[in-house]
Amino acid sequence: MTIPRRPGDKGYQRPETISDLHRPPGAPRPREIKSQQAQLESAHRHGTNKSVKWPMSYKTGQREKPEER
């Protein structure tokens, strides 16, 4: 795989490194299940108003979240 020429490089080709490649080698890794579950359990459910702001007392655990309808 060759690196495309960049304007102003004056003909110098940088050596190819792993960071130059778009994707890492090997099989794709599965997504993190915990983060997906946390997103589904968050206050911002799919199709709800995204402008809902939870008070800090809910975030720190001093108050319980209200039950969903």
Image (tube, grey):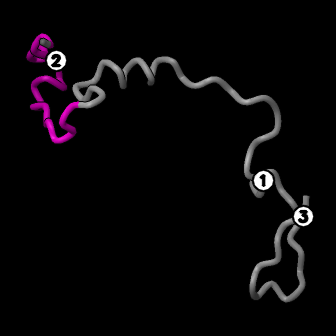
Q: Residues within 10 Å of mark 3 (few under 14, many from 20)?
A: few
- State yes or no: residue 65 in magenta: yes
C-alpha distance separating marks 2 and 3: 53 Å
Residue at label 1?
21
The answer to which of marks 2 and 3 sits earlier in the sequence is 3
> Residue 2's mark?
3
Instruction: For marks 3 and 1, give the CA distance.
Output: 10 Å
Q: Is residue 66 left or right of residue 28?
A: left
Read off the residue under disc 2: 61
Q: Residues within 10 Å of mark 1 (few under 14, many from 20)?
A: few
Q: Find residue 43 and report its horizontal and vertical position in percent.
A: 22, 25
The secondary structure that dominates the magenta segment is: loop
Name the residue nearer the viewer: 18 or 69. 69
Lateral position of residue 69 relative to residue 41, left or right: left
Relative height, residue 50 to residue 64 (above, below): below
> What is the span of residues highlighted in magenta in the rendered image?
48-68
Q: What residue is shown at x 78% (from left), y 53% (from top)?
A: 21
Q: CA distance from mark 1 to mark 2?
A: 43 Å
Which quarter of the image is occupied by the N terminus? bottom right
Q: Quadrant of residue 50?
A: top left
Which of pointers 2 and 3 indicates the residue nearer the eye? 3
Q: Amino acid at mark 1?
A: Leu
